Amino acid sequence: MHIKTLVIIAAVNTICKCCDLEELLGPKQTSLEDATLRSSLVFRGMALPIQDPAFSVFTVFFELITVYKGDGFLKEWRKLNNYFRKINVTFETRTTAADCLDGNKVPRDYVVFASLIQDEIRAGSVAKWDENADLRVWKALGWSQWSDWSSCSVSCSAGIQQRTRHCLQQKCSGFNIQQRHCNLFSCSETVTPLDQKSGKFFHPSQDRWQPLADRPTAWRLTPNSYIWIPASLLFSDEECRNIPKDFSLALTMRVPNATLGTVFSVRSRSRQHLYLSLEVTGADLKLIHAAESGTDMVRIPAGLDDGVWHQIAFSLREGRILDVFVDCEWSRTEVLLAHSLEVPDDCDIIVGYLFTGDLEQLSIIKNPHAAHLQCSNTPIPIEDPDVRFTKDGFKLFTRKHAVKSRKHRY
């Protein structure tokens, strides 16, 4: 995605004790939906406010991420202004430079509601961006909800996945497809227990493991279905014939409401009280580690109880650091007690156990910094004119050069 830079300059006279743009410029009695419909240009941008002492104005630099509405206006504006323009906003404030800089060192994403007046873009209001705001703006513009992300095209070494949506009216501003890169980690560093050929490790039996009808690359797990396999067989090329002390784990899963159970665990054969276990508990995940020094637990909010596919990735590094990514976004980094994440020397790997849900991916990656490589957090927007709205509903119109008819946005 190509990112352009926009600049907003605000010269204002209302009193405000902070530099939160939503406090300064937010619509006070207007919903996101109304602001979307009333504005000729709506976009998402990442803002970092900076004070300009020479003019005593509040300046905001925006990195353009998504255009919801008014792409045609923006294209004309770019031609006139060589892709860069200061946007004058008629709001005033007595906020000081120190207040602004102290409170806004971290960039924030906003939805900006603006209009194009002659060759000048004027922002009327903003709202903080989040997933809910994003859905509300798109819904106001006539779009359906997004589908689940498709399966990744490959299990390692860089694939792609897509999701789609439909325009619920005759014409919508925006795009109907998003595409992102996935499974960017190396195949030589990846072990996949679900791909085991020998049926003796599947319980109750391999023929009881059935792929999903709507997603043939995924499996439906029930409380009595699991894989139990010695780590020495999965990591036979390793000198120690064991799972590495530091590694990454990538999962793609879908669970029903109120699910409990173990998705993945590493257990010592000789000392049953030593194990590392990833468990589902309702909407969240728990990583439990039992060692000689005691048991530790990290709870990971993941929003799994919505019945849609989620991508979860972890990196365990330096014997004590846990990096967590949920749906391609960094979620948290936990620093535990020294050596509290030790992997047992003689261990078995178990996939599933007393767990109900759908599992498509469970990749163990020898690179302890690979969690962020499961999927990109910057999807590419695509317009596909072969999918059109008609009076009879949605129809796919096939062209001789259908691939060329797709247009990447921004």
Image (cartoon, grey):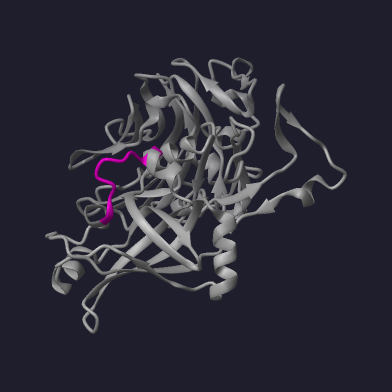
The answer to whether residue 367 is left or right of residue 89 is right
Instruction: Identify the main secondary structure in magenta.
Output: loop
Whether residue 28 appears in this view of the structure is yes
Question: How many discs appear?
Answer: 0
Magenta part of the chain: 25-33
Residue 28 in the magenta stretch? The answer is yes
Q: Nearer the viewer, residue 281 or 25?
A: 25
Q: Residue 384 in the image: x percent, y percent?
A: 70, 44
Question: Residue drawn 72% across and 43% down?
Answer: 385
Taking the image as shown, residue 20 lies to the left or right of residue 131, namely left
Q: Residue at x 34, y 19 (%)?
A: 258
> Looking at the image, is 363 positioned above or below residue 41?
above
In the image, taking residue 91 as reference, residue 71 lies left or right, namely right
Q: Quadrant of residue 211?
A: top right
Viewer-side residue, 355 vs 233: 355
Of all residues, the one furthest to the front in this rendering is 118
Say which of 328 and 222 sits in front. Answer: 328
Q: What residue is shown at x 54% (from left), y 31% (from top)?
A: 144
Judge whether 261 appears above or below 338 on screen. above
Answer yes or no: is residue 312 visible. no
The residue depicted at 49 percent of the width and 44 percent of the height is 364
201 relative to 118, above or below: above
Q: Quadrant of residue 38?
A: top left
Q: Position of residue 287 (x, y in %)?
A: 31, 37
Q: Quadrant of residue 269?
A: top left
Indicate the quadrant containing the N terminus: top left, top right, bottom left or bottom right: bottom right
State left or right for residue 166 relative to residue 254: right
